[in-house]
Amino acid sequence: MTPRDLGPARRVVSLVPSLTEAVASTSPAVLVGATDWCSQPADLRVTRVRGTKNPDIAQIVGLAPDLVIANEEENRAPDLAALRAAGLTVLVTEVRSLPQAFRELHRVLVEACGLPRPSWLDAAEQAWASASPHPAGRPRKAVVPVWRRPWMVLGRDTFAGDLLARLGVENVYGDHEERYPRVPVDELTGSGADLVVLPDEPYPFTADDGPEAFPDIPAALVSGRHLTWYGPSLAEAPAVLAAALAPPAPAAPGRRGR
């Protein structure tokens, strides 16, 4: 849809954690509802409308929002259709790359909500423009699990995959026909990857998952919020991710005693 023709939205319900943080960090008074999964900002105080995949349609309608913001990947089409059938305006974003994220954030915040362009959005664009594509000197090939039971990994055309590529990490399954393919762990370990990237969300991977499932491949545990969220965290994401992905420093040679 295009932004509302009746003027800037002043009552917004967000069904996307990233967009919830983006709106609340820019103008908290505009946001009246968000999902149970919307954990940022930490002091967020709005009406909760259940999950991203099972929003409480009646409760959202009762909040009388000017605008509901959603995402084509995060939210289900039948739920969005039900909201429209109830007479609500729904803006559905698509975010599959960093440039697209920046465009959609501007569209939501500035065009749809009529807010001043936030300084954090400019800071995020500047941070990524300065990001080094190959901080370790050469690209690395990685598998990037996003779920474990069953094993699922990043495939083609994903926002997180684009961020990793900008930091010198090539997604082994980046050309897969599916965006989130299910791949058995023995195939992952034999994929030729020299790195496993383990985000701590949506599946809560921990440092123990690397050596347990991928004993012969180095693993990097990264912040899922910095890898998969598109909002204020984008400003610090290049530095946070680069630090987590950096190869371990070689051990210093031991000194001989005299």
Image (spheres, rainbow, N blue to C red):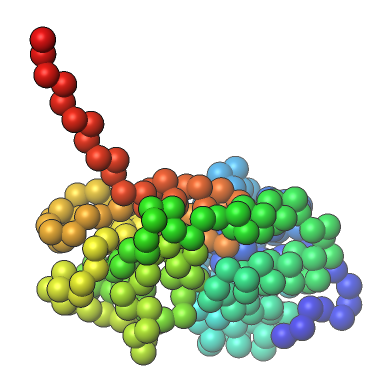
Whether residue 8 appears in this view of the structure is: yes
Q: Nearer the viewer, residue 218 or 26?
A: 218
In the image, what residue occupies the spot 29% across and 40% down? 249
Badge count: 0
- Choose top left, top right, bottom left or bottom right for residue 56: bottom right
Whether residue 26 is visible to the viewer of this picture, yes or no, is: no
Residue sitting at x 74%, y 72%: 107
Along the line of sight, the residue nearer the viewer: 55 or 99: 99
Q: Residue 40 in the image: x percent, y percent?
A: 56, 51
Residue 180, placed above or below residue 142: below
Picture coordinates of residue 20 (x, y %)?
A: 62, 60
The quadrant of the picture occupied by the C terminus is top left
Question: Residue 149, position in %: x, y?
Answer: 22, 70
Q: Is residue 71 above or below residue 139?
A: below
Q: Position of residue 175 (x, y in %)?
A: 37, 84
Q: Residue at x 89, y 72 (%)?
A: 7
Query: Is 93 positioned to the left or the right of 122 in the image?
Result: left
Which corner quadrant holds the N terminus? bottom right
Compare residues 32 and 147 and report the one nearer the observer: 147
Residue 250 occupies quadrant: top left
> Is 66 displayed left or right of 124 in the figure?
right
Furthest residue in direction front, as rendered: 258
Look at 48% across and 70% down and name the residue there: 162
Report whether 2 appears left or right of 231: right
From the viewer's perspective, tell me whether residue 17 is left or right of residue 205: right
> Quick one: 45 or 133, which is closer to the camera?
133
